[in-house]
Amino acid sequence: MISDDATCRSFSSRWLGPSFWAPACRRRGGVAILCSDRFRNNVSVWQKDSDGRVLSILVTLNDIKLNLVNVYTPTYPTERKTFFQSLHSFFFPNSELILGGDFNCYDSLLDKMGGTARIDKSLSDLKSSCALRDAWRLKHPRERHFTWFNHNRTIASRLDSFLISRSLCGQISACKIWPCLRSDHDFVILDIELSGLLKHGPGVWKINNSLLEDEHFRSSIEDLIDTFISFRHVFSSTKELWDALKDDIKLVTVNFSRRRSRERAREKVLLTNRLIALKNRLALGLRSDAQEILVLEASLRAIYDKELEGSKIRSRVKWLEEGELPSRYFFSLERQRHERTLVSSVFNSEGLEVSSLPEIIEVHEIYYDNLFANEEMDLAVQNELLSHVSSRLPEARRASCEGSLTLAEASEALKLSNRNRTPGPDGLSLEFYLTFWSRLGPLLVDTFNECLTEGVLCDSMKASVTRLVHKKDDRRLLKNWRPISLLNVDYKICSKAISLRLASVLECIVNPDQTCSVPGRSISSNVILLRDCLNYIEQTDETGILISLDQEKAFDRVNRSFMLRLLEHFGFGPSFVNCIRTLYNGANMRILVNDFLSRPVLLRRGVRQGDALSPLLYVLCVEVLACKIRASENIKGFLLPGARGLQFKVAQYADDTTAIVKDYRSLVCLFEAISLYERGTGAKLNLSKTKAMWLGAWKNCRDEPLGLTWVRKVKILGVVFGVENTERENWEPRLSKLDKSLSLWRSRSLSLLGKVLILNILGLSKLLFLSRFMQPPKWVVDKVNNLIWPFLWGSRVETVARRTILCPPLKGGLGLKDFVCQGKAARLAAFVKSLTDSSYMAYHKSVMLHFPEEVYKFVGVADIAPHLLNALGPDKVSAVQFLRNGRVRVTTKTTAYRDELLRGSSFRYGDIEVPVSAADALFLPVYVRDLPYEVPDADVVSVFKAFGVVLSIRPCYFKNFPSVANGTRVLQMSFTDPLPSSLHVASCPVRVWHPGQPASCSVCREPGHLPRDCPYSGLCLKCQSPGHKARNCPSSTSTSAPSSVVPASPASTPEPTPEPLPPSTPAPSPVPSSTPVPPPVVPTSASTPVPPVPPPVVSTSASIPVPSVPVTSVPSTSVLSVLVSSPTVQSPVTSASSFQIPVFPVSTDVPLEEGEIPMLAELSEAGASSSKSVRSSNAPRAIDYKKLVRLVLPKVKPGSVSSNVKKLCLSLVKAHRLNVSEDECSRIADSVCSKS
């Protein structure tokens, strides 16, 4: 053990080469790094800890920086975890790391023999966060060797190892374990060949945004800009002035940065020397300088922290907490970004692997020269493809895309651009333009408009740097790297302004199947539609084939000539087309390979990834493929249920294209359409990555036609779909990413609020996207809780209740989002959005204008329409419909304009203020059949107004004979009450149908049940009486309703003289002599008073038990029938003033009690008087009235209060959904209570 400086000096004197020591201050510790005497390289800096457990040196070997770190890790797990978390402070940035020593732990069961195995997760976290690899395990993947044994050799572990950067993995010559006779630990020997190690270049210069906070720097840049503007006349063009100005800005910035760096270095040296001197004085016992020492240490600490702030910037972290110190998180992210862009070897065009830097750069140049080389297209094929594109830009929308760039547009583009992004080759950031926009803005707009006039950009705008990012699969294949263009910010501002113009009109020409980059559309629509289609096919066992198409280098293979031709075909004007042509004229790029720049590569085709305009242009190009697929009758898609023939054939999100076809023939035709698209546009399908899947009844099919990759599960738009359970495939990768992400964030010194912010915005966002489409199972929720709560508290102990943490800050919580509730809300929001998606209905974009009726007295629709369209703006509306009663329905093209109309609450039309309201009601077509042609529209509308708002009515015509009507009327209505399936219009029975109509009973005309389940089934449809059918109804041959009273026996009962009718009762109509009128039944005893007999009416089959009325004598053969109702309706067509609603009749099966008959007669009169305003064709209301009487009578007790009976009536009306008004309920209650 090396425990003091004297021992270190003693050992160092005996070692011939350079040596570095970190003595231990306690019993355990002490590490050293010894270099060979042949070592002639420079050790620029080294550092150690105070406990003798860490020693780190930075060595430069042939322009390659190596960070060698020797560690002796604590044995206790808690101390070891803290040690690993603080180890990052000893790593030097921008260097290759070799970390070796005694780790006193292991992270694999292969490294343990005997005893109890305890895997240390903190070691795995260290390797993951710093992108390190175990050198010995790389060479011996499955072998079991150990570096430590106990005294009797029963327990062993591999505790000593080397962890190296990924870039060094390919340079390992050997790694072996060698016995050591003087220690209980064996040697670990690592041989690395550094001659083949690729070094990194200088990269691309970028402005340090911290300079923008320096007042002196801002002043010098402003003076420079003013000087160039004042000498504007010296330059031959504005483009030349712009390029020269940017060159001088870079020169001034570099000089200022160097000068400031020298000043800071000088200050640091002075402070360090002063601190050393004061500490020496302190060692001599002079303690008067103690306060100054503290001040000097604080100043030096601030300088070091400022230097380490660069790791935050280089790590590209989006979320930073104020005052947070640089930590392992930033260093690890910086190192990971460095590793992702490293290219160690590639395959050339002949399939040979090359690994030297010049060869790697040359392979890149050749590959991208070929990729962006222009190809001749088949014009005939292009013409055929364009023939299927029917969308055209309206003239008004076309004009909005024309014209020169304005300063307002450029300013808006600057505000909407993303900040903290890597700038282009000129190194000027977006923040730089924001700082000096008042001076640079007008000059940039003039420069770009001059470029548009000349048809070519200035040299700096043409240039770009392409950074390669590995996607997946073999890193040696260049097709597995995504090129990202780093464009100059001045170009991006101009391109963004043009893209805003294009985005505003994209909705007019791109089908709703495409959801990328179109305002108002979302990727969720694609996923939900695909999920529901697959579920429906699975449940119904239909047949189908799903195809997920993969385009090879989709953005890079766009043919420019076809793209410009397509823009003209869509209807874009010459100014806009010229603008797009100028942006790509002469464009070139230089590839950044291991921070070295290649020669310029001319971009003859493709749209650049990283440009705001690129996805919009690509969407227009790939729309041609979708149009071809949709137009092909040979491609049979999935027939959407209830969509009136609409098929799901294709759905797109940028280059992610998914198709569902019905059969094999459609599959063949689909790929024929794709082949045609390739020949016309230069696109190329990547068959090796195109996936196909049998669906429904074919899911177990084993055929694999067309050379496609046939799977049972496929990942589309980030979600795994399949004919098998995909729960694990969807959730487990996201949970794993969440776990790794939180492991990195644990090393940051975050407050509780900072942790909540990370969990809300970054942590759970990995899961919430999937939660929009599927409910997370219980095991997922449990796993999420096991991750987020220990992360929040730093341990398993939760000091505050979870429900409190979930509360908003104003209620004492921290505002942590509830994952379960947030998932439910996301799914509900997706469901609501699918109901109002503009792809399928436009009601959320419609408003209703309510014109006063007097307007139509002086002018007609033909006079109003032109002025109204000009006032609304024809480029802002999709449709204007003139409806009845002064209503005009306006469908806008955007929700923004619809909201603008609603905010005003009225619309000025000349001198008239026209009220505006939202057209939120669902207007459906209602088809009226079996109606004579001669019946006026007004009679039809008068009947249907009882069930809702009738907006319009029109007749239907035969398809092949448009001048001949078929008698059917079509009404546009919104419903307030259920609409029965049969009604009477002008005394004629008609059938009624509308989309989504529920089952309706033809007996009682109420929706919700069929005739076989109707309580009134078995009644005569004409007189509502039991015992006969409508064809045998006596009322069909008589103008008055016959009584159904059974006459008494003639032998026992003489025929009395009928009593006169009460004054309030209308006299019955004359009865033809052919129809005998049965006499009423009267008591035989003269001593018994005879109650007045109510008028005879039509009875129904349903009956109410009524107590008997005492009589003196009634023959046993006679049956007492007392019918209580309103007078019979004489004709199907009766005026509203004479129409009577019959109340429910009383069955004669049970004798009546005294006083019951007058009470029911009173109810009959009340029902008759209350129904005078009801139309004769509204038969369901009459039936409802009878229902209510039937329900109320058995429930009323003697002495009941009228108000209570009325409440009972209202509750029964609501419970049974009866069509009875409140006034009618009041009359029934008054009658019942007055007679009870």
Image (cartoon, grey):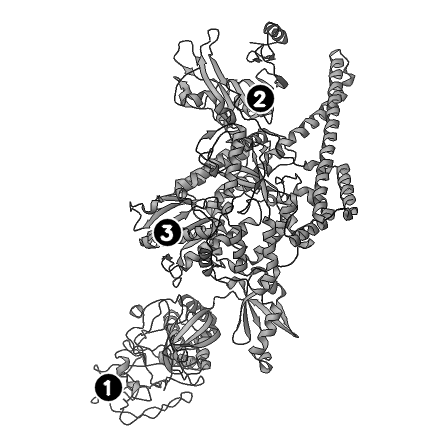
Q: How far is disc 2 from disc 1 in space, using C-alphas? A: 122 Å
**Place of residue 527 in the rendered image (x, y in percent of width and height, measured from the top left):** 44, 50
Q: Residue at x 74, y 18 (%)?
A: 273
Q: Quadrant of residue 1028?
A: bottom left
| Mark whose residue sits in front, 2 or 3 | 2
Identify the residue under disc 3: 535
Would you place residue 230 above or below residue 1006 in this image?
A: above
Residue 794 screen position, x and y as percent: 54, 31
Q: Quadrant of residue 946?
A: bottom left
Number of numbered discs visible in the structure rendering = 3
Left or right? Give the position of 1037 relative to 670: left
Label 2: element kind? strand
Disc 3: CA contacts within 10 A as few (<14), some (14-19) or many (>=20): some
Residue 243 in the image, given as x and y percentages of width and height = 69, 43
The residue tagged with tag 1: helix, strand or loop?
loop
* Nearer to the camera, 819 or 1008: 819
Lower position in the chain sequence, tag 2 or tag 1:
2
Which circle, 1 or 3, is nearer the viewer? 3
Q: Is residue 315 above or below residue 560?
A: above
Q: List the residue tagged with mark 1.
A: 1048
- Name the foreground residue: 1209 vs 1217: 1217
Q: Disc 2 marks which residue?
A: 67
Taking the image as drawn, is residue 49 in sight? yes
Distance from the alpha carbon under mark 1 to that under mark 3: 70 Å
The residue lying at 44 percent from left, 34 percent from top is 350
10 Å neighbourhood of mark 2: few (<14), some, or many (≥20)? many
